[in-house]
Image: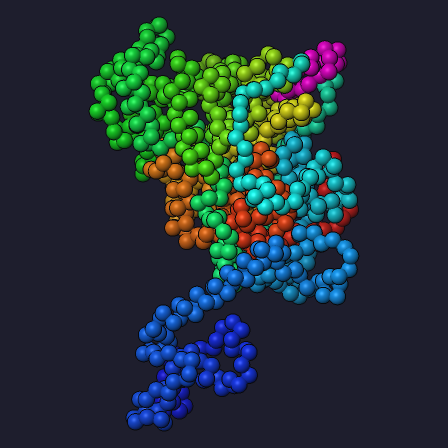
């Protein structure tokens, strides 16, 4: 008779067959010294042919369940006992997490022994870290590459981080304090006093509620006196002069910003790093390590994270704060909402004059629809035809045409523009309806993009008047200004002679209102709710992405050809930098640069984003550039990703790198981009989260982390974020997290923080101090 085979291996003894499964180390098995026999500790049945006829009887240990099994599988007949055991473990973890939460202290690291705790010194919140299973690499060389490669790669990465810090500090945008501290350890410069954030301590929700108090009168604003400075452009960048005499002598107030030659040099340096073979290999290995490390973290700590979330009363994914960090105002409603609004307006305001042609012919809303042979009954979602479909994939022209309801640009002009015959009255109403939906949801916010084209100098005044006259305000909404890259179209239609005219129309009114608010009173009231600037257009348009310092300045750029992406970004950044210095001096709010970047086109766009943008939108192409992806991780640059939008335009959903970015620890958030084109429900942001969670099997912890990231990278005021995330949110690591508001477990926050510390330490420990940071001058 042949020996029985288990898992393909013959057993020498034919009349005994053992299936063994050791207990998990849950505290039960290890505490019973009497159980020495391996077979007695098995959860599986033991077949013993010696104890029964023909070897078919079954010997049962006291704690075992009867099973009918086939190797190598183990299928219990009574799964309820197995489930109850798992639930018991989970309950134990939940009780433990609740106890930790109540004490407001987790287990601290064993660096402080029990004898030392009694010593009279204060422990900061950051000294306490949650207890969880950590993944660490031991040994002398933990980078996995030769020391020479590590030194060379680290030198370049530190140089790149130094460049970004310089550009962020110049423009008064944010740079993470953790990376800044590491850079100070190398260049020995003192920490900038202005950059040091005043941290507040954690407060209970009873003392500091989750919801910020509502604004009373958003448009109430004092008009400060005029400063009487002189403002004039110098090589495409507006400078501020204290007097006319200084202007004549060419002596502007010394607001620091990089000139074009410095920008070109820094950009070329970063481009050469991207192409460096050993650096690419190093960054790829580190990113792969980060992915694997996160998978291990989830395997080891998923139950603990879930237990921490269950221990928090009331808070869950539905009632944590979420910000839609990338959404366009002209498409912020879904298609059914727009259809209902058009029907309602046609019913109640049919005789209102809505257009006036160049010949002076007036048309009412009824006449506009009659000219298209349409009635309210004819209108349907299919008739509107605003949803993106398979025909828009890699066809940005067709996608842009979807902004025209029923394919009619006249209807877009009437309903979705701020500057039309009605002065944007209908558009203001539908935006207010969307804002009302956000307020009703309580926990959803949006950063809507409005367009300034740079065609005329009065665009800003018209936009501010539209907002104030239509009372377009909500505590749940802030604004970004998107600047379409359309110089070539304007030039072709003879609307302007050179690129400087676009810069004049975009930035001069902002400098004028800062210098003398009485020149643009409505704009002065509107600007406190403006976050910053976005740059939009089809990134896949052919262009020459690199240019040198001898490129034509804006006043001499009179060609029909559109300037490259980097040219637009540099002059937007440089003018914004001077404007921020000027406004900060007057105690006014400053702006940030958050362009569309890396959706398609050359990877040099992402280099511009790394240098000059506080956050970017999309960032899909980072998946092809490991050096930049690793730098975006180290600098924790916010990336607003819109996988449903990408699915219709540039990248199929299952190929989207979002889950990969999330695992590696990049600072990403989910956003909708264009609900009118891509979404179906009243809550497009929840729809975005829902689909991502289903497709990529995101856990509750993952989704809450994305939501917390969206608040952190948003442009909402610091005071609002203190209500939403906790007064302590500016602190690093666990000390900056309040699970009772964010529903993100301290374990996850601690893992992210410690992993980033490890990566930065890995790089900075081998950097030669005298030779680095040559670009900080």
Q: Which residues are magenta?
A: 227-250
Q: Is residue 176 magenta?
A: no
> Residue farthest to the front?
206
**Residue under the image location 63 percent in, 46 percent down:** 202
Residue at position x 77%, y 60% from top? 119
Q: Tag count in the figure?
A: 0
Q: Who's the residue at 42% across and 80% down the image? A: 63
Residue 21 in picture, x, y percent from top left: 44, 77
Residue 367 picture quarter: top left
Name the spot of residue 570 as percent of width and height, x first: 59, 29
Q: Quadrant of residue 227?
A: top right
Position of residue 489 measured from the top left corner of the image (x, y, whole percent): 45, 20
**Relative depth, front residue between 474 and 357:** 474
Tell me the quadrant of the picture where the N terminus can be found: bottom left
Q: Is residue 215 visible?
A: yes
335 up-or-down from 702: above or below: above
Question: Would residue 229 be counted in the magenta stretch?
Answer: yes
Q: Position of residue 557 (x, y in %)?
A: 56, 20
Location of residue 52 with respect to 336 vertically, above or below: below
Q: Does residue 402 appear left or right of residue 700 in this picture?
A: left
Q: Identify which residue is drawn at 28% across, 23% down.
A: 343
Asked whether, in this view, residue 423 is left or right of residue 708, the answer is left
């Amino acid at each position: 008779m042949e020996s029985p085979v288990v898992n393909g291996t013959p057993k020498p003894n034919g009349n005994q067959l053992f299936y063994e499964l050791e207990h998990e180390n849950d505290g039960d098995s290890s505490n019973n010294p009497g159980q020495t026999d391996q077979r007695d500790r098995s959860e599986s049945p033991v077949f013993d042919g010696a104890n029964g006829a023909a070897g078919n009887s079954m010997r049962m240990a006291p704690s075992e369940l009867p099973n009918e099994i086939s190797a190598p599988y183990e299928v219990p007949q009574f799964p309820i006992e197995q489930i109850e055991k798992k639930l018991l473990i989970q309950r134990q973890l939940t009780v433990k997490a609740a106890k930790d939460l109540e004490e407001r202290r987790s287990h601290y690291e064993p660096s402080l022994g029990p004898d030392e705790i009694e010593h009279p010194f204060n422990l900061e919140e950051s000294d306490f870290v949650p207890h969880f299973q950590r993944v660490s690499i031991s040994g002398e060389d933990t980078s996995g590459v030769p020391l020479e490669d590590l030194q060379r790669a680290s030198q370049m990465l530190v140089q790149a981080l130094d460049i970004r810090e310089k550009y962020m500090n110049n423009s008064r945008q944010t740079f993470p304090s953790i990376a800044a501290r590491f850079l100070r350890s190398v260049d020995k410069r003192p920490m900038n006093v202005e950059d040091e954030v005043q941290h507040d301590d954690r407060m209970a929700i009873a003392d500091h509620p989750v919801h910020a108090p509502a604004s009373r009168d958003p448009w109430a604003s004092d008009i400060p006196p005029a400063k009487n400075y002189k403002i004039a452009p110098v090589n495409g960048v507006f400078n501020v002069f204290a007097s006319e005499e200084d202007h004549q002598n060419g002596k502007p107030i010394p607001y620091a910003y990089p000139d074009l030659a410095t920008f070109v040099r820094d950009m070329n340096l970063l481009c050469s790093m991207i192409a460096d073979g050993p650096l690419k290999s190093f960054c790829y290995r580190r990113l792969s390590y980060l992915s694997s490390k996160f998978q291990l973290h989830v395997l080891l700590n998923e139950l603990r994270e879930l237990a921490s979330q269950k221990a928090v009363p009331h808070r869950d994914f539905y009632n944590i704060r979420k910000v839609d960090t990338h959404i366009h105002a002209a498409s912020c409603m879904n298609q059914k909402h727009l259809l209902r609004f058009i029907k309602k307006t046609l019913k109640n305001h049919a005789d209102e004059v809505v257009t006036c042609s160049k010949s002076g012919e007036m048309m009412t809303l009824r006449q506009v629809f009659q000219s298209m042979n349409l009635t309210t009954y004819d209108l349907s979602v299919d008739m509107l035809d605003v949803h993106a479909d398979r025909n828009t994939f890699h066809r940005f022209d067709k996608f842009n045409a979807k902004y025209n309801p029923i394919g009619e640009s006249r209807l877009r002009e009437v309903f979705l523009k701020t500057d039309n015959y009605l002065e944007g009255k209908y558009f203001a109403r539908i935006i207010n309806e969307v804002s009302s939906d956000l307020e009703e949801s309580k926990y959803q916010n949006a950063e809507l993009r409005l367009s300034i084209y740079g065609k005329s100098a009065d665009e800003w005044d018209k936009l501010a008047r539209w907002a104030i006259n239509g009372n377009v305000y909500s505590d749940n909404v802030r604004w970004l200004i998107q600047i379409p890259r359309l110089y070539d179209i304007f030039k072709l239609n003879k609307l302007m002679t050179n690129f400087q005219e676009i810069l004049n129309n975009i930035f001069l009114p902002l400098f004028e209102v800062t210098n003398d608010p009485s020149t643009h009173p409505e704009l002065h009231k509107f600007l406190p709710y403006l976050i910053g600037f976005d740059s939009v257009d089809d990134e896949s348009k052919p262009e020459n992405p690199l240019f040198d310092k001898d490129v034509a300045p804006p006043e001499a750029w009179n060609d029909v050809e559109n300037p490259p992406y980097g040219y637009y970004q540099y002059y937007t950044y440089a003018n914004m930098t001077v404007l921020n210095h000027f406004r900060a001096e007057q105690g006014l709010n400053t702006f940030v640069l958050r362009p569309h970047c890396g959706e398609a086109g050359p990877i040099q766009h992402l280099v511009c984003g790394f240098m000059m943008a506080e956050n970017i939108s999309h960032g899909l192409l980072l998946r092809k550039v490991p050096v930049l992806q690793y730098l975006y991780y180290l600098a924790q640059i916010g990336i607003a990703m819109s996988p449903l939008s990408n699915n219709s335009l540039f990248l199929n959903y299952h190929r989207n790198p979002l889950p990969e970015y999330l695992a590696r620890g990049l600072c990403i958030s989910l956003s909708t981009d264009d609900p009118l084109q891509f979404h179906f429900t009243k809550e497009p942001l929840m729809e975005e989260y829902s689909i991502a969670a289903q497709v990529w099997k995101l856990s509750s912890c993952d989704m809450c982390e994305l939501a917390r990231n969206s608040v952190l990278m948003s442009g909402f005021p610091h005071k609002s974020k203190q209500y939403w995330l906790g007064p302590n949110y500016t602190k690093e690591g666990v000390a900056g997290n309040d699970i009772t508001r964010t529903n993100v477990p301290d374990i996850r926050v601690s893992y992210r923080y410690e992993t980033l510390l490890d990566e930065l330490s890995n790089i900075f420990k081998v950097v030669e101090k005298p030779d680095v940071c040559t670009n900080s001058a």
